[in-house]
């Protein structure tokens, strides 16, 4: 493992680019940064709020799940996110950033009359639309019930795909695009949904409260965050508290847990010519780590 960047303000949503650089969101900074292979950090865009998940779209734009902002506190060497809403919070949103100019535009703040509370992560399908999770917000004694949405990147359509679901976080598609995976943070469970058509999944019956098929849940005090899928179809889920990437087979077997220094290991993406280079965000300590992975990662739609 090698630390290639530090001093980042709660980094999330890494996106590996063809030139070897990596885009990261700074949730606490309201910015998108680019980290070059030599560790040089450059500002790409200032988007405000709390940029979280990032993905490249079919038009070459960068699509951003913006959670609207979080409250942060410095606790020794750790920068931690807390409950409650920051004073400038208005809503969550989906944004598009022009990587050439750094200009950000807001595509969605609502699905019909339902406001986006805290969009978290997203994944594009081969059809050019994207699924995204809305983790929601926690205020005092009230916690939002989460949802998964599907939207078009031109701002023309957004639909609710899954509701209710508890604090959905990481999201990804199987290599054939026929299965949607969603990770719940507080339950530490990974769910699977058959994809029927773009923006529509098969919902299972009770006793599944969210309509999903349970892939796996971890023992003890662990919490799931964002995820990526490798070329073999394994689901690599960032796991909080333990500070690792948990590699799960599609059947739910724990293949391995790769440990990292930060207990708030939040996300992973794959890059490099052979897709065996993993980039992992360490949010409490503000670092981006590069390491070689045992399996090649799945090349995302529109990643190139």
Image (cartoon, rainbow, N blue to C red):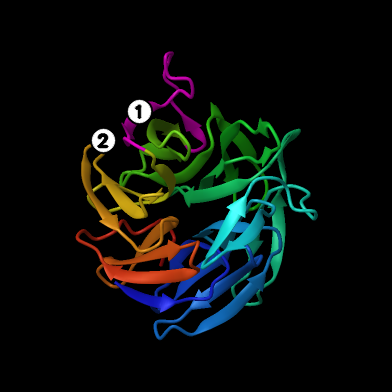
Instruction: State if disc 1 and disc 2 touch (CB < 8 Å).
Output: yes
- For disc 1, the neighbor class at 10 Å (few under 14, some 14 to 19, many from 20) is some
Q: Is residue 27 visible?
A: no
Q: Is residue 151 left or right of residue 90?
A: left
Is 108 within the magenta? Answer: no
Q: Residue at x 35, y 28 (%)?
A: 214
Q: Nearer the viewer, residue 203 or 83?
A: 83
**Position of the C terminus by quadrant:** bottom left
| Quarter of image, res 203 | top left
Query: Where residue 3 sits: x, y (%)?
Result: 38, 75
Which residue lies at the image location 66% right of the left edge and 65% below the top edge? Answer: 30
Q: Residue 36 vs residue 111: left or right?
A: left
Residue 256 badge: none
Q: Which mark is residue 214?
A: 1
Q: Position of residue 131 (x, y in %)?
A: 52, 43
Q: Quadrant of the N terminus?
A: bottom left
Q: Which mark is residue 252?
A: 2
């Amino acid at each position: 493992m090698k630390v290639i960047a530090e001093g980042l303000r709660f980094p999330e949503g890494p996106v590996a680019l063809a030139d070897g650089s990596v885009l990261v969101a700074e949730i606490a900074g309201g910015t998108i940064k680019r980290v070059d292979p030599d560790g040089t950090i450059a500002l790409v865009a200032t988007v405000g709020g709390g940029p979280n998940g990032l993905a490249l779209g079919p038009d070459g734009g960068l699509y951003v799940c913006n959670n609207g902002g979080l409250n942060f506190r410095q606790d020794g060497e750790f920068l931690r996110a807390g409950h409650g809403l920051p004073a400038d919070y208005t809503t969550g949103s989906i944004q598009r950033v022009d990587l050439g100019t750094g200009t950000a535009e807001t595509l969605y703040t609502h699905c019909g009359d339902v406001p986006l509370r805290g969009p978290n992560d997203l994944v594009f399908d081969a059809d050019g639309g994207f699924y995204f999770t809305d983790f929601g917000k926690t205020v005092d004694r009230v916690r939002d019930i989460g949802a998964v949405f599907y939207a078009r990147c031109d701002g023309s359509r957004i639909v609710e795909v899954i509701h209710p679901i508890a604090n959905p976080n990481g999201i990804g598609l199987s290599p054939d695009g026929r299965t949607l995976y969603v990770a719940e943070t507080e339950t530490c469970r990974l769910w699977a949904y058959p994809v029927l058509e773009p923006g529509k999944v098969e919902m299972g019956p009770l006793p599944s409260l969210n309509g999903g098929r349970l892939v796996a849940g971890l023992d003890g005090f662990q919490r799931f965050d964002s995820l990526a899928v490798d070329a073999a179809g394994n689901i690599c889920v960032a796991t909080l508290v333990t500070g690792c990437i948990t590699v799960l087979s599609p059947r739910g077997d724990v293949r391995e847990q790769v440990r990292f220094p930060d207990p708030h290991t939040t996300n992973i993406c794959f890059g490099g010519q052979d897709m065996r280079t993993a980039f992992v965000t360490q949010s409490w300590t503000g670092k981006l780590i590069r390491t070689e992975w045992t399996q090649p990662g799945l090349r995302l739609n529109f990643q190139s």
